[in-house]
Amino acid sequence: MVKIIMHGCNGRMGQFITSMAAQDPECEIVAGIDVSDHIQNTYPVFTSVDACDVDADVIIDFSTAKAIDALMDYSEKRNIPCVYCSTGLSEEQNARLQAFSGKVAVFKSANMSVGINLLMKLVKDAAKTLAAAGFDMEIVEKHHNQKLDAPSGTALALADSINEEFDGAYEYVYDRSTRRAKRPEKEIGISAVRGGTIVGDHDVIFAGTQEVVTLSHTAYSREVFAKGALEAAKFMKGRTSGYFTMADVIG
């Protein structure tokens, strides 16, 4: 049994994970942390991470970037591995996660979906062939109108998975409205759409001469992210140090 503290338990993803954990015989949420405690849960909820004194094997985080610093302090102080699912982290926050993963285990993936993580592998392989053949690369992501950060962490991770193959040679361009010039060769365009209740939609477009190859992923329910977070929690139980991603879980 994996005992879990749910950080951001009363948000939409926190409630999805709570519901799915209740149906998983290998998982138990033993405490929650959220600035809002208006929802009645089967476990105690603390409005401050420092106030949580419940023993656990793993923390799952689905909160906001501004809550991450306190969570990192808590995880490091109590030596509890954490699955960080929040997006929009600063360069400083990501650097700190890398740094203290030598002391306490860290799991960080921009997207918890197994399908998205497979897509990252596929676009990397596609880019090796298509970019060398002169194809332009564009990423279009679509999310619901309540999402705070843009572009999505997943879109950036997809771009990074491509750029790693070329030693960071490609520039990311988020807005062409102020530019009146032809598209340069070494660029990856990243566009964000916000509307309605779109759970998550990512297209990676390879546009060549007289042909286009598009690799896509669509999430129809937040359940896919909740399932991935619980699998990551199981994977992290008992780990004392190291930096892990969903690629380690799916193998």
Image: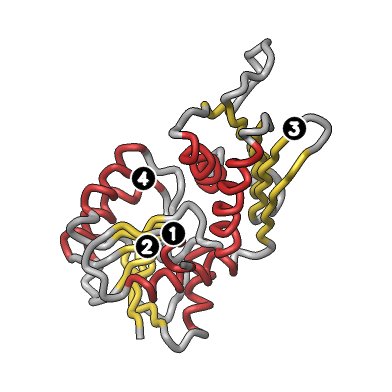
**Residue 160 visible somewhere in the drawing:** yes
Looking at the rendered structure, the secondary structure element under dot 3 is: loop
Q: Mark 4 points at which residue?
A: 66
Specify few, some or many for label 4: CA neighbours under 10 Å numbering under 14, 14-19, or 20 or more. Answer: few
* Label 3 or label 4, whichever comes before in sequence order: 4
Tell me which residue sits at (63%, 14%) in the image: 178
Q: In this view, does 200 lie above or below 171?
A: below
Q: What residue type is labelled 2?
A: Val
Q: Quadrant of residue 60?
A: bottom left
User: What's the distance in space between the residues labelled 4 and 1, CA to CA?
Assistant: 12 Å
Q: What residue type is labelled 3?
A: Gly
* Label 2 or label 4, whichever comes before in sequence order: 4
Q: What numbered label is drawn on residue 208?
A: 3
Callout 2–callout 4 Cβ contact below 8 Å: no
From the viewer's side, name the closer residue of 131 and 27: 131
Q: Which mark lies nearer to you, 3 or 1?
A: 3
User: What's the distance in space between the residues labelled 1 and 2, CA to CA?
Assistant: 9 Å
Q: In this view, does 228 lie above or below 23?
A: above
